[in-house]
Structure formats: structure tokens, C-alpha cells
Image (cartoon, rainbow, N blue to C red):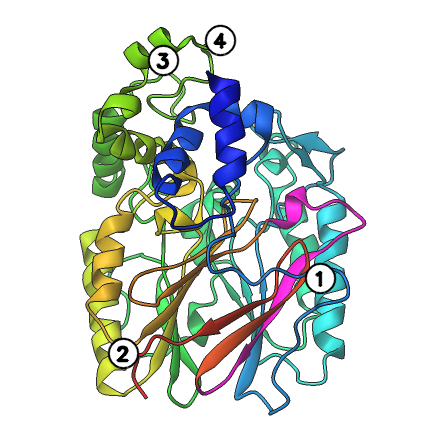
């Protein structure tokens, strides 16, 4: 049954929007056994994507861009031998990651149009540094490489930042780039959020995806208690890094077993069930205070007729990432984004496979591939060229070129 489903998945996967696509997308998410046989999701980065093939690389417009900026995610540097991810299915190149970071900084320095800034999307050093007592040393190493960038670096915080440092330590560190932000609508409390305008009529907003989390908060804080309550409600596993409702430990099932165990085949409930995988310890969520702040910043941008790019370590659209990498309250963030006329794009990291989706309103959701799982012979960074009516991502290595046209309803 599974092999048959896999064959049909593969035959239908090049028809986005087909009658079978939604069904089989969920089958694919629900049956890890199928994924082990046929590989990763055949849709990741396929819908509305602009793929680069040898000899047909896309190039920016001939006209000069309004500005450009660099993007890179999940460097996860550690001075240790190569290893593997949590599920032991992917190689991780810990020492090599800083070499790829150095290569990216050098390339940005040599571009004809120097980037206005660089976005470092989180997890800049790996959690393995903690057990080696090397967190400070590893951070110094990557910051030294980032000093070679031709522009200011805006840092986003991911789960690995919180494995290595407390929130107070991060706020006092060089990874706190909020000093580069616009002073209006200052952040409430100790959330790591800010916004800035890199050019007239444009604004970039940095969010704190671990504002409500187990790893990003002191155990005595209200936000930790809120996160613990969320996890208790959704995940009963002893190891909270293991997603709820996961069949990975089950052998290949017969159809009757699958019918009994996998509610998807007979109920739309499994669509929600698949998204339940996001309730793991290495994810987090956005507090009500942060969501209100975001709404106020976007209202300011609406008033000023600006185009807005929002960034976070965690993705917020289910079609731009594996469900296990989603922010806990992603749907609330989407509702806020959709309630404003200024937002053009949401950029995230965390999912090392990367991903992309354009929703029904025309908003783009871009998830960058991770440096840490990029082989030494390749790369994983990009430059975004910003124009009046679109952005162009020039990817390097694993990152694809993409044309991101602004939605019709967007300001200007």
C-alpha cells in the first residue's frame, strides 16, 4: 500500500494544484515510512518556484536596484567533527560552516552593488558548544567572520542561541542588533523585537519567535509557564523534542493497520494532526504583547505607505516548511499579516531544507536552507535585490533564484 501510494505521489507531484495534491501532501507528512523510501517532500520549494538549472541562472534586472541585502541562515558553527541531525538522517558540517560564512561575506564584499545590510536568521552557533564549554569562543569566531561583511548585520535569535546563552546574556551581547532599529514603538519588556527602514518606503521587522518558549525563558517567568502549559496540552512525550502523534517508531503498516492508526485516511482531522508536530521544545511562539506590537508597527507602515519584510527564525506558513518547524501560534501571525496592506514577504530559517510558498493574497514566505547541512563544495546564502515592484533573490549553492513580485494590494 505504501509503495503504491509513493508511486502515485511521485507521478502526481509535478501537477501543483491537482485534485490529488492536497490529499497526498498530507499522506506524505503523515507517513514517515514513505518519506524514508522516497526521500523528502516532493513539493518543498516547488509551488510557484523559480528553479535554477545549469546554464540558465536568473539574473537581476538591468536597472539598478533601490537597495540590496544579504541573507544567510543556520550557520550552527562548532569546532567539532562532522556529525548528524537529531534524527540521524542528515550530515552536519560543524567546522566547515564558518568557512561557508566567510565565503558569503567575501562574496557580498565583491558584489557590484554592496548590500545595505545582512540578515543573519538565527542559530549562528550550535548547541554542542555548551558541553565543550566553547559557547563564547564559538561566538567570537563567527562574529569575527561577520566583521568582514561590507554592511551592518541584523541578527535574529533561534533555538541554538538559547541553548548557549540566557536571554539576559543575549540582550547584552553583540547578537543584540536592536540598537540599529527605529526608536518608534519601542519593544515592551525583554522581547527581542525591532524594526528599521533600510530605504524610503521600505521597512523590515525582526520578531522574537522564542518569546514564549521553554528554552528561551527562565523557569520562574510567566512566559515559561505559558509555554509549559502549551506543551502539556499538545505533547505528552517524555522527550519534548519528539513531536506528538509521530509514527516514526511504527513498522511499515498494512492498509488495515493504517486505517486504524492514521485518522487522515478517513478524516480531515489529520490536517490538524500533521500541524501538531510543531509543538516541540525546539520551537516557540509569539506573546500577545509581541503580536500587538507587530500590529502597531504594520499600522505605522500602512500609514506611511511602506512595503514591509518580516523576519523570524521560525516559519509561520505551513506550506513554506515542514510542520515540525512551524511557530506554535503561526496562524495568529498570518491573520495579522493579512490584515495589513503593507506586507510583501516573510523570511525565516530553522528548516534546513528550506522552502517557499506564495499565498492566496500574494504574500511570499521564504525559508532559507541551512548552512550547517551544506556540503563543503556548495554554498547556502543569497542576495536580495529590491526594486519598486518586486524583489529578486539571487541564490548561491543550495538556495534557488526567485522573483518575488509584490502583491497587487500592497502600498505604492
x, y percent for residue 182: 36, 79
Are there few (<14), some (14-19), or many (20+) residues within 10 Å of tag 2? few
- For marks 2 and 1, the one nearer the N-term is 1
Q: Is residue 94 magenta?
A: no
Q: Residue at x 68, y 71 (%)?
A: 149
| Foreground disc of the pair 4, 1 | 4
- For marks 4 and 1, the one nearer the N-term is 1
> Is label 3 in a helix, a strand or a loop?
helix
**Are the two marked residues, 2 and 4, in contact with CB atoms closer than 8 angstroms?**
no
- For marks 2 and 4, the one nearer the N-term is 4
> Is label 2 in a helix, a strand or a loop?
loop
Viewer can see residue 215? no
| Foreground disc of the pair 3, 2 | 3
x, y percent for residue 107: 74, 70
Cα separation, mark 4 vs mark 1, equals: 46 Å
Q: Is residue 90 left or right of residue 172?
A: right
Q: Residue at x 36, y 31 (%)?
A: 277
Q: Residue at x 61, y 60 (%)?
A: 51
Q: Which residue is mark 1?
A: 145
Cα separation, mark 4 vs mark 3, equals: 11 Å
Cα separation, mark 1 vs mark 3, equals: 50 Å
Cα separation, mark 2 vs mark 4, equals: 49 Å
Q: Which residue is mark 4?
A: 251
Q: Is residue 103 above or below residue 46?
A: below
> Is label 1 in a helix, a strand or a loop?
helix
Q: Is residue 176 above or below residue 240?
A: below
| Foreground disc of the pair 4, 3 | 3
Please name whichever residue, 351 or 20, is drawn nearer the observer in this view of the structure.
Answer: 20
Residue 380: name its quadrant.
bottom right
Region in magenta: 370-388
Q: Which mark is residue 409?
A: 2
- For marks 3 and 2, the one nearer the N-term is 3
Amino acid at each position: 500500500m505504501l509503495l503504491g501510494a509513493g508511486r502515485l505521489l511521485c507521478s502526481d507531484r509535478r501537477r501543483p494544484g491537482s485534485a490529488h495534491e492536497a490529499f497526498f501532501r498530507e499522506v506524505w507528512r503523515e507517513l514517515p515510512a514513505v518519506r524514508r523510501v522516497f526521500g523528502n517532500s516532493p513539493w518543498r520549494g516547488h509551488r510557484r518556484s523559480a528553479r535554477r538549472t545549469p546554464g540558465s541562472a536568473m539574473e537581476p534586472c538591468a536597472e539598478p536596484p533601490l537597495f540590496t541585502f544579504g541573507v544567510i541562515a543556520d550557520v550552527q558553527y562548532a569546532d567539532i567533527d562532522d556529525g548528524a541531525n537529531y534524527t540521524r538522517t542528515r550530515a552536519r558540517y560543524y567546522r566547515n560552516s564558518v568557512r561557508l560564512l566567510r565565503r558569503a561575506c567575501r562574496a557580498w564584499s565583491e558584489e557590484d552593488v554592496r548590500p545595505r545590510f545582512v540578515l543573519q536568521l538565527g542559530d549562528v552557533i550550535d548547541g554542542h558548544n555548551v558541553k565543550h564549554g566553547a559557547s563564547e569562543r564559538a561566538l567570537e569566531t563567527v562574529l569575527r567572520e561577520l566583521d568582514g561583511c561590507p554592511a551592518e548585520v541584523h541578527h535574529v535569535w533561534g533555538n541554538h542561541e538559547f541553548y548557549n546563552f540566557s536571554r539576559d546574556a543575549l540582550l547584552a551581547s553583540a547578537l543584540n542588533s536592536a540598537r540599529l532599529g527605529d526608536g518608534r514603538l519601542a519593544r515592551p519588556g525583554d522581547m527581542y523585537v525591532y524594526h528599521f527602514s533600510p530605504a524610503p518606503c521600505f521597512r523590515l521587522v525582526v520578531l522574537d519567535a522564542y518569546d514564549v518558549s521553554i528554552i528561551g525563558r527562565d523557569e520562574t517567568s510567566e512566559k515559561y509557564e505559558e509555554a509549559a502549559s502549551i506543551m502539556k496540552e499538545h505533547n505528552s512525550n517524555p522527550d519534548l523534542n519528539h513531536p506528538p502523534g509521530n509514527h516514526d517508531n511504527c513498522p511499515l503498516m498494512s492498509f488495515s493497520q493504517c486505517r486504524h492508526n492514521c485518522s487522515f485516511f478517513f478524516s480531515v482531522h489529520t490536517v490538524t494532526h500533521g500541524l501538531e508536530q510543531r509543538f516541540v521544545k525546539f520551537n516557540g511562539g509569539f506573546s500577545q504583547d509581541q503580536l500587538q506590537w507587530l500590529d502597531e508597527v504594520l499600522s505605522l507602515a500602512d500609514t506611511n505607505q511602506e512595503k514591509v519584510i518580516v523576519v523570524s527564525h521560525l516559519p509561520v506558513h505551513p506550506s513554506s516548511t515542514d510542520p515540525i518547524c512551524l511557530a506554535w501560534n503561526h496562524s495568529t501571525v498570518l491573520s495579522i499579516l493579512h490584515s495589513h496592506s503593507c506586507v510583501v514577504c516573510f523570511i525565516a530559517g530553522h528548516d534546513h531544507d528550506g522552502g517557499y510558498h506564495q499565498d492566496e493574497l500574494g504574500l511570499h514566505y521564504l525559508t532559507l536552507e541551512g548552512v550547517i547541512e551544506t556540503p563543503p563544495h556548495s554554498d547556502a546564502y543569497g542576495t536580495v535585490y529590491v526594486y519598486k515592484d518586486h524583489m529578486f533573490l539571487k541564490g548561491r549553492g543550495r538556495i534557488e533564484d526567485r522573483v518575488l513580485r509584490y502583491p497587487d494590494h500592497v502600498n505604492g
